[in-house]
Image (cartoon, rainbow, N blue to C red):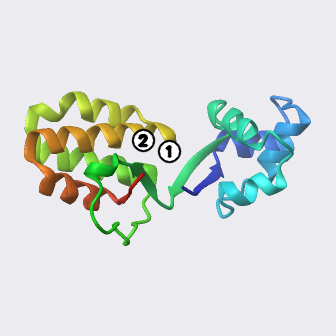
Amino acid sequence: MSTIYRKTEQGRNEIATRALRLVPRLRQALILVDGKRSDEELRKLIAPPADDTLQALLEQGHIEVIAVTAVHVVLPAEAAPATPLVNAVVLTLQETRQRAVRWMSAHLGPYADSTNIRVEKAKTPEAMQAALALAVTVVRQQLGEAKAAEFEQHVGLARTGS
């Protein structure tokens, strides 16, 4: 999964004013976040532990996720299709959230509420991946395998066997 971050208003203000006096490691990483580089590219440019640095900037509100190139849900081998889905959809976290909640509400009505709350609360790609895995399970249990596959395709999930 590849994630693209951009500076928030707070992050841009910190670069301009140094008001929060970020430690040099965080400031240097914040400067590198440009809304174009993926997390893989940033990891090569940021001193280790780069993932911790990006997570700290995200948690402190200096950066935000603007795109996730693909979300992969690893399913048990018995649930995986004979051929993997190959048309991954590039959606932002917000677009994925909206598509999932709308689909679940339209197809499951109030039975989707608790799952939709988890999807709505997902702020990171990892949290979204976990919420969508739960959503797929709920759809499969309530509506069957065909509807689960339809949901996965609608929100841009790609299946991989284990």
Q: Is residue 9 left or right of residue 103?
A: right
Q: Is residue 103 left or right of residue 49?
A: left
Give the farthest residue toward the front.
78
Give above or below for 158 relative to 115: below
Q: CA distance from mark 2 to mark 1?
A: 5 Å
Corner quadrant of residue 82: bottom left
Q: How many marks?
A: 2
Q: Quadrant of the N terminus?
A: bottom right
Q: Residue at x 67, y 30 (%)?
A: 60
The circle drawn on residue 128 is 2
State the residue in front, 160 or 162: 162
The circle drawn on residue 154 is none
Q: Residue at x 82, y 38 (%)?
A: 26
Q: Residue 113, percent across and down?
A: 19, 30
Residue contact at pointers 2 and 1, CB within 8 angstroms: yes
Label 1 sits on a secondary structure element that is: helix
> Tag 1: residue type?
Pro
Q: Residue 50, percent across and down?
A: 77, 43
Which residue does the numbered mark 1 point to in the structure image? 125
Q: Residue 72, percent across and down?
A: 43, 54
Q: Residues within 10 Å of mark 1 (few under 14, many from 20)?
A: some
Q: Is residue 93 left or right of residue 44?
A: left
Label 2 sits on a secondary structure element that is: helix
Q: Is residue 88 left or right of residue 110?
A: right
> Tag 2: residue type?
Met
State the residue in front, 81 or 124: 81
State the residue in front, 133 or 110: 133
Q: Residue at x 42, y 43 (%)?
A: 129
Q: Residue 156, percent across and down?
A: 35, 60
Q: Residue at x 37, y 72 (%)?
A: 87
